[in-house]
């Protein structure tokens, strides 16, 4: 024997029929709270606020940040060029043959 029952009702009517609590007011209040918090945190996503938060207190202006970057680039560039002229100590000296030339 097979019995089929079709119930046509809204979710609210079914919750009431089974005696479940109406959580819609609580859900609306929670969604309002979440929305308020998200709006408040969007102010912290402002680019200027983010940069001020991430940079140290002494480097708050763009000019200071650019000078610090250029100082680091120049220091790296100067130290990188100091030992590139000769690796073996014999390259570029007249009369000296490299290992490759001696093998020929």
Image (tube, rainbow, N blue to C red):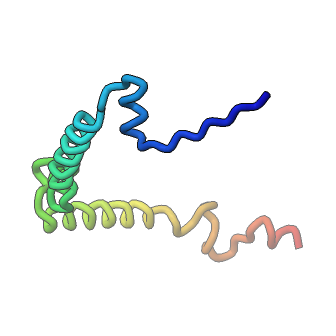
Q: How many marks?
A: 0
Residue 45, image x and y in percent?
A: 22, 56
Residue 102 horizontal side relative to residue 14, left or right = right
Vertical position of residue 57 compared to residue 94: above or below: above
Q: Nearer the viewer, residue 65 or 101?
A: 65
In-front residue for pair 68/86: 68
Residue 68: x percent and y percent?
22, 60
Residue sitting at x 39%, y 60%: 79
Res. 69 image quadrant = bottom left
User: Toward the viewer: 43 or 103?
Assistant: 43
**Left or right of 73: which side holds 62?**
left
For this orientation, the residue located farthest to the right is 104
The N terminus lies in quadrant: top right
Q: Residue at x 52, y 66 (%)?
A: 84
* Vertical position of residue 3 compared to residue 58: above or below: above
- Which of 39 and 99 lies nearest the eye of the viewer? 39
Q: Which residue is at a point 28% across and 38% down the rendered structure image? A: 24
Q: Please give left or right for residue 76 compared with residue 93 in the image.
A: left
The x, y position of residue 36, in whole percent, is 17, 47
Which image quarter holds the C terminus?
bottom right
Q: Position of residue 7 (x, y in %)?
A: 53, 39
């Amino acid at each position: 024997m097979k019995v089929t029952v079709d119930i046509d009702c809204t979710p609210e009517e079914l919750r009431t029929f089974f005696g479940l609590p109406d959580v819609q007011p609580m859900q609306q209040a929670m969604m309002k709270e979440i929305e308020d918090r998200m709006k408040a945190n969007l102010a912290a996503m402002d680019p200027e606020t983010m940069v001020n938060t991430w940079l140290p207190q002494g480097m708050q202006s763009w000019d200071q940040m650019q000078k610090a970057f250029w100082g680091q680039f120049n220091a790296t560039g100067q130290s990188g060029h100091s030992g590139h002229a000769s690796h073996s100590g014999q390259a570029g000296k007249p009369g000296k043959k490299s290992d490759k030339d001696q093998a020929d």
